[in-house]
Image: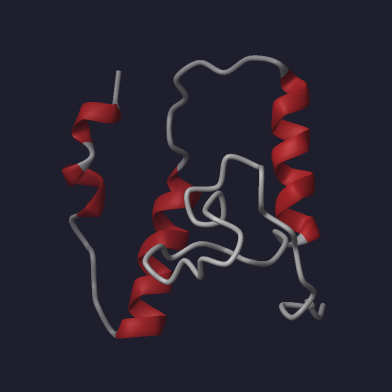
Amino acid sequence: MSYDFDKPVNRRDTHSMKWDVKEHELPMWVADMDFQTAPEIQAAIQERAAHGVFGYSVVPEEWYQAYMGWWERRHGFSMETLKSDYKYSKR
């Protein structure tokens, strides 16, 4: 799927720390997304929000594997102990 990262999105008056500034001020001091979120991400958020329950959840094993795999593939960095670093999140 392709994405249009060049489509302008007006962020003024949306409580954006970056864009709620004076009219001719160019805010170069805040890193912010100036493009729309990918449709797949929007759909996933809408699906989760439709569930209507926003309590604490157990992080599934697949999340750890995906996260550690991304770091390994992208940066050659192994995180074998990641799960033990998040012991506080367990019941």
Residue sitting at x 51%, y 70%: 26
Query: Left or right: 87 with respect to 1?
Result: left
For residue 38, which quarter of the picture? bottom right
Q: Which residue is more in the foreground, 89 or 62? A: 89
In terms of depth relative to the viewer, which is nearer, 2 or 83? Answer: 2
Indicate how the structure is coloured in the image: secondary structure
Between residue 60 and residue 6, name the one nearer to us.
6
Horizontal side of residue 45 vs 61, given as left or right = right
**Up-down relation of residue 12 to residue 9 (above or below):** above
| Residue located 24% across and 78% down the image | 77
| Quarter-of-image position of residue 36 | bottom right
**Residue 53 at x, y percent in the picture:** 63, 14
Side (left or right) of 2 relative to 71 = right
Residue located 43% across and 28% down the image: 58
Q: The N terminus is located in which quarter?
A: bottom right
Query: In screen coordinates, is 90 left or right of 3?
Result: left
Residue 74 appears in which quarter of the rendering?
Answer: bottom left
Eyeballing the image, is 14 above or below 23? Answer: above
Residue 31 is situated, as x and y percent measured from the top left of the image, at 43, 65
Q: Position of residue 46 (x, y in %)?
A: 77, 36
> Is 22 above or below relative to 46?
below
| Residue 44: x %, y % from top left | 73, 44
